[in-house]
Image (tube, helix red, strand yellow):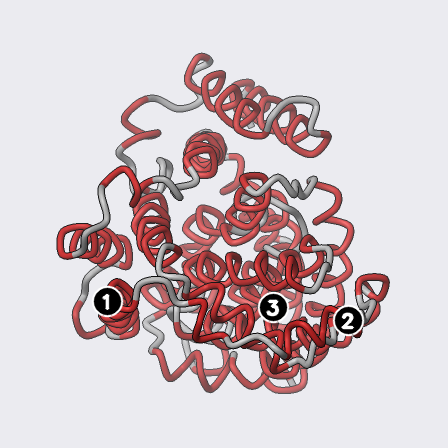
Amino acid sequence: MTALAWLSVAVFLGAYALIATEWVHRVAAALGGAGIMLLIHATDSGAAFFSEHTGIDWNVIFLLLGMMVIVGVLKQTGVFEYLAIWAAKRARGRPFRLMVLLVVITASASALLDNVTTVLLIAPVTFLVCERLALPVVPFLIAEAMASNIGGTATLVGDPPNIIIASRGGLTFNDFLVHMAPMVLLLVLVFVGLCRVMFRKTFVYDPERAAEIMALNEREAIADRTLLWQSLAVLALVLAAFVLHPVLHYEPSVVAILGAGVLVAVTKVTTEEAIAEVEWPTLVFFAGLFVMVGALVETGVIGRISELAVNATGGRLGLATMGLLWISTGLSAIVDNIPYVATMSPIVADLVQASGGNDHAQVLWWALAFGADLGGNATAVGAAANVVVIGIAARNRTPISFWDFTRYGLVVTLTTVALVTPYLWLRYLI
């Protein structure tokens, strides 16, 4: 690699160290790293702001912005308070039952929506229900972020890397259901078991709080029924457009912004009220992170790492599959999985063709998808959903540190990928 490539690696590692140690605010670290990348010409304004492959992913930024506005309007209706009371009553006030319920809802919704939208919708409910039951909210938020990444692995629309993989590999929505979804169901069950162990100190049952919850009428929480129905109608149209993306061909970001615009236009909510819930620091953090990772792509660092990994397999499909799975897991833990998959997918496409281009060789796509999606759980910055949850937590004065998330994320990632390994081997390679 060139001297500039090594310098860009040093800048990225330095910024990542600051994010991990929290010596400076993560937004300052990301913006500082992005600024230095531009200063040393590891990237430029064209590549950073306008390139589809090495620049800020505006689809992610505007998807988040649109959904944050919609959630901000929904919050004024009281529907999150309603859902919080309903969930707590369903769980009969028992913390572990509540976590199981929220994890299953999050994983299921993430399979149909993108995982970022899901955590934006479920996080406000979590804060309210934990407040009602006097429970620490951080374990629940961490569990939901991880459940969203696991659930989103199941379908083409569940996680942005899957959309990239489907486009490159010529794969359909049904292909993901057949090859990914069965294993994801098992992973969700295993994850529930891990939650029971990892967060066991959280599950302290308070009979008095539970009795208070059971006595509440969730219907009384709705503050504005007209606004609620207007908001739910717009949200339903947005979610339907997400699911119908293969037919309508509108990007989720376009759908989210249109939905937010319509909701603000047709309701009595003011523009100031609508944007009050937007997590601006989270959006800026993503922008900085995209520029830094784009610089690594621009200088050839990520591509070089990927090529070395592919060359090391020597054309052996089994070794290539296992190597791709675990290397994707490791790299997606430290860089956002969207630019990683965008960089890796052309190499995988060539490898699939070199392996015969048949259904047997398609296992390489599933290895890339599992590794990138599940690897995102390993660290606080591995997936978009993680960053969004941490941003929401900070806004509500319950900060989640990098290591608070990562110490659980590493356990979940190693366990889930270890289970995927024999699945791929037994189903496709023997």
Marks 1, 2: nearer the viewer: 2
> SS at mark 2?
helix
Q: Residue at x 64, y 55 (%)?
A: 327
Answer with left or right where residue 377 lies relative to residue 134. left
For disc 3, the neighbor class at 10 Å (few under 14, some 14 to 19, many from 20) is many
Residue 78 percent across, percent down from the top left: 41, 62
Q: Residue at x 52, y 79 (%)?
A: 180
Residue 362 appears anywhere in the view: no
**Nearer to the camera, 239 or 172:** 239
Give the residue pinned by disc 1: 226
Marks 2, 3: nearer the viewer: 2
Give the residue pinned by disc 2: 208
Residue 31 percent across, percent down from the top left: 48, 23
Q: Which mark is residue 91?
A: none
**Nearer to the camera, 52 or 395:** 395
Measured along the vertical axis of the image, is residue 222 above or below residue 266?
below
Measure how far apart labels 2 and 3 are at the Cα level: 53 Å
Which label's residue is closer to the chain start, 3 or 1?
Answer: 1
Please tell me how many numbered marks the rendered image carries. Answer: 3
Residue 188 percent across, percent down from the top left: 64, 77
Measure how far apart labels 3 and 1 are at the Cα level: 53 Å
Q: Are marks 1 and 2 in contact (CB under 8 Å)?
A: no
Measure how far apart labels 1 and 2 are at the Cα level: 34 Å
User: Which kind of residue does numbered mark 1 sit on?
Assistant: Thr
Give the residue pinned by disc 3: 321
Answer with left or right where residue 229 lies relative to residue 411. left
| Res 390 → quadrant | top right
Residue 223 percent across, percent down from the top left: 36, 62
